[in-house]
Amino acid sequence: MFLLRPPGVYRPQGDTSMLAEAVEQIGIRPGARVLDVGTGTGAIAVLAARTAVARVTAVDISLRAVLAARLNVWIHGLRQVRVLRGDLFTPVEGEVFDVILANPPYVIGKPGHPGKHSRDRAWDAGPDGRRVLDQICAQAPGHLAERGTLLIVQSALSGVQLTLSRLRESGMEPGVVASRPEPFGPVMRARAALLEARGLIAPGQRHEELVVIRADRTDAVVPLRA
Ligand SMILES: C[S@@+](CC[C@H](N)C(=O)[O-])C[C@H]1O[C@@H](n2cnc3c(N)ncnc32)[C@H](O)[C@@H]1O
C-alpha cells in the first residue's frame, strides 16, 4: 500500500504488518466504529477503512504523524476516516467503538518521558516498555461497545502475561492470536547491550518475539458512564 512517511513519523514495519494481518482475520463488519490509537502514517486506519466500509477514527500525539495520516487518508480517498491529535483516548472522550486497534510504543528504553519533539516518542516506552501499554489496558475497555474487540501488538520483552492479566483485571477476555520472531531493527540493535545487561535477552540475541493480543469485551467491563 502506498503511504507517504515524512521524517520523524514511524515507518510501518513488522509490527504494523502483524496487526494488519490480525485486522484482516477478525473481519470488521460494515458500519463498524473503528479506533486506531497511535496511528503514525495512518497505515492501519487506511487498511481498516479499505477492507470494510467502517467509520474509522485515527489518533496520534505527534503533529507530524497526524498530518501524515491525514494526507494518506486523502490520497486513498477515504472520507470516512477522521484523524485527531491527542494523548491516547483523550480526543475521543465519551465515545465507544466496536474495534480498537493499537501498535503502541513498547520498546524498553530509558526512565522518564521522551521529549515532546523527540522521534523516540514513536517507540520508547520507558524502563519496562509498558508506559503506553498499561494505559491502553486500563482505558481501552471503557471505550469498547458491547461485544467490542481490542487488537494490540507488542514485543514479548515488554511482558505479554502482564498485558493479559491487566486486560483481565479490566474485565476483558484476552488471548494471543499471533506470534512471530522479528530481527532487531536499528532501534533495538542500539539497545541490545542494555537489554543484555539487564538479562532480558541472551548474549548475542538479535531478535524479539512480536505478539498480537486480541481481547473481547465481557459484561464485567464498567461502562464509560456508569
Ligand atoms: C509504533 S508507532 C505505530 C504507528 C502505526 N500505527 C503503525 O503501526 O505503523 C506508535 C505511534 O504511537 C504514537 N504515540 C505515542 N504515544 C502516544 C500517545 N500517548 N497517544 C497517542 N499516540 C501516541 C506515536 O507518535 C507513533 O506514531
Image: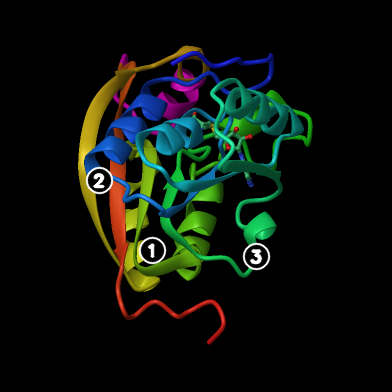
* Amino acid at the residue labelled 1: Arg
Magenta part of the chain? 191-204
Question: Left of 203 or right of it: where is 138?
Answer: right
- Name the residue located 54 percent from the left edge and 57 percent from the top edge: 135
- Amino acid type indicated by mark 3: Glu
| Residue 93: in magenta span | no
Position in image of residue 226 (x %, y %): 53, 87
Three-letter amino acid code of the residue under disc 2: Ile
**Splitting the image into 4 quarters, where does residue 94 fall?**
bottom right
Q: Which residue is mark 3?
A: 93
Structural distance between the alpha carbons of marks 2 and 1:
22 Å
Going from N to C along the chain, the mark reached first, 3 or 2, is 2
> Distance of mark 3 from mark 2, alpha carbons?
25 Å
N-terminal-most mark, 3 or 1:
3
Q: Residues within 10 Å of mark 2 (few under 14, many from 20)?
A: few
Quarter of the figure with the N terminus: top left
